[in-house]
Amino acid sequence: MAPEADLERFRLRAEGGESAHVADGLDPQIEVALHQREALRPVRLGQELGAQRRGRDGIHVLEQELLPGVEAGGDDAEREGEDEGEKSQHGPDHGADGAFAVIHRPTALELTEGVPEKDRTDDDGERADVDHAQIKSVEHGGSVGEPLGGVKRSRSRLSRRLEWDYPRPMALRTAEWPALPLERWRDTYATLHMWTQIVGKVCLALTPLKNHYWNIAFQVTPAGLATPVMFHRDRTLQITFDFVRHELRFEVSDGECRRIPLEPRSVADFYALIMKTLEGLGMKVQIWTMPVEIPDPIRFPEDTIHHTYDPAQAHAFWSALVAMKPVFEDFGCQFLGKCSPVHFFWGSFDLAVTRFSGKRAPERPEADGMTREAYSHEVISHGFWPGSGPVQEAAFYAYAAPPPDGLAEAKVEPAAAGWSTELGEFILPYEAVRQSGDPEAALTAFLETTYDAGARLAGWNRDELERRRA
């Protein structure tokens, strides 16, 4: 635990309106000690960015989370003077300084539209008074301490309906399918790709090899992308890219937690911060610093070219993953044979799910070791990536390895899907799915028809591999 003197010095600096940089000589465990002081208290959305203050070596200390009695700062007074034209520059979920995006969740106003009044009741049978003006104020920076629905703390019949009554395949019908034009976020995409590769290589160093390198893939979480649990001597570690709070979080089994803000910075600086943070946790790790699966790679410590981070665009990308993941999960659940998790590969920066026939694939002596491990058995794989190379837009893909004869000529759905001769796989533009009347149904049709074509032409034993539908 940090000395009380250090805690008091930090409090005085914060209350005095000075910069809350951790002073030289402050106990290096200050962040950990402060983090354990008090749980996160509700704060205004507009204050969340202002509540962050940079600590030692670029690692944030979150004031409102760590220091009881210290009010979060922010730019709300300045933002109140903005007109609608000024606000529109930053987008609907972008802070006035263009540096912070807030996750868009459906509001109670949106959710109650079209719902019969008889369903808008609390547990005692009384009508839940939904104050639309109050709800809208929450959307634009008001208190977020109230539960969804806004006005009463008891769980309403509406909230119970929202939690349980959605049909498959989407467990939640509230997920968004945001626009992901490549030209708008190309630089953030390139930087984030390198950042995820650094963390991914840490995962490679701290986990045992699982078949097809599933041990190094990230998982989509309610806040971002997270590594599997990693192992270092007698402790475990998980690293999360949090695209809601926009921080890289290091959580250790002994209770320690460190954070690095996700903000514009070079790959070289990001690499140095990660290595220093791990060393500070007593988990010094060495990785191969050359990026993979990209043209013209630059070693992480030397890469000052990639330095862009737009939180709104990063948040949009993660939101798209959240929207599509349940569709991939449902598709995977229909298969009784060996099937991968729905996971994110940082090398190719794609979300993927892969089915296996159970048969060994032909050897690939010319391929590198990772490729040989990945394609040791016959597969049909589906996934999504933001676009690169010949496909300059976000897209879904489907391929079989090895590809059976006649696959390129197979008829698949929806109509926007087609075969890419250059890639040797089916491609469905993300925007076509997003703009369809039912994105989940469009994506499901693509997954099922491309699998059907590949499995049929490759002669898979489908009676043994597939779940029989009722």
Image: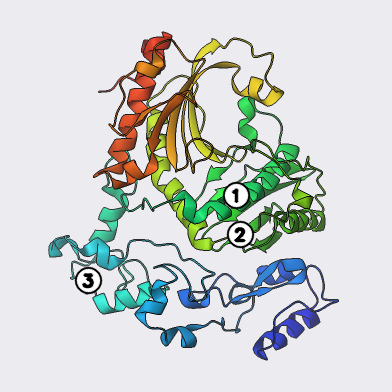
Q: Secondary structure at mark 1?
A: helix
- Three-letter code, disc 1: Ala
Number of callouts:
3
- Kindly identify the amino acid type of the residue bearing the numbered disc 2: Thr
In the image, which is nearer the foreground, mark 1 or mark 3? 1
Q: Which of the pair 410/202 is nearer the observer?
A: 410
Give the residue at mark 3: 128
Is residue 177 or residue 217 the one in the foreground?
A: 177
| Quarter of the image that includes the C terminus | top left
Q: Which residue is mark 1?
A: 190
**Residue at the farthest right position:** 25
Using the image, tell me which numbered label, if any, was put on residue 132: none
Q: Quadrant of the N terminus?
A: bottom right
- Residue, x 34% and y 49% (percent of image)? 172
What x and y, as percent, mark residue 435?
Answer: 29, 47
Q: Earlier in the sequence, mark 2 or mark 3?
A: 3
Q: Which residue is mark 2?
A: 308
For the residues carrying marks 2 and 3, which lies nearer the camera in this image? 2
- Left or right of 279, for residue 420: left
- Give the amino acid at mark 3: Ala
Place of residue 251 in the rendered image (x, y in percent of width and height, measured from the top left): 67, 55
**Mark found first going from the N terminus, 2 or 1:** 1
| Label 2 – label 3 distance at C-alpha | 45 Å
Q: Is residue 290 above or below residue 454?
A: below
Q: Is residue 57 above or below residue 468?
A: below
- Tell me the CA gap for discs 2 and 1: 8 Å
Q: Residues within 10 Å of mark 2 (few under 14, many from 20)?
A: some
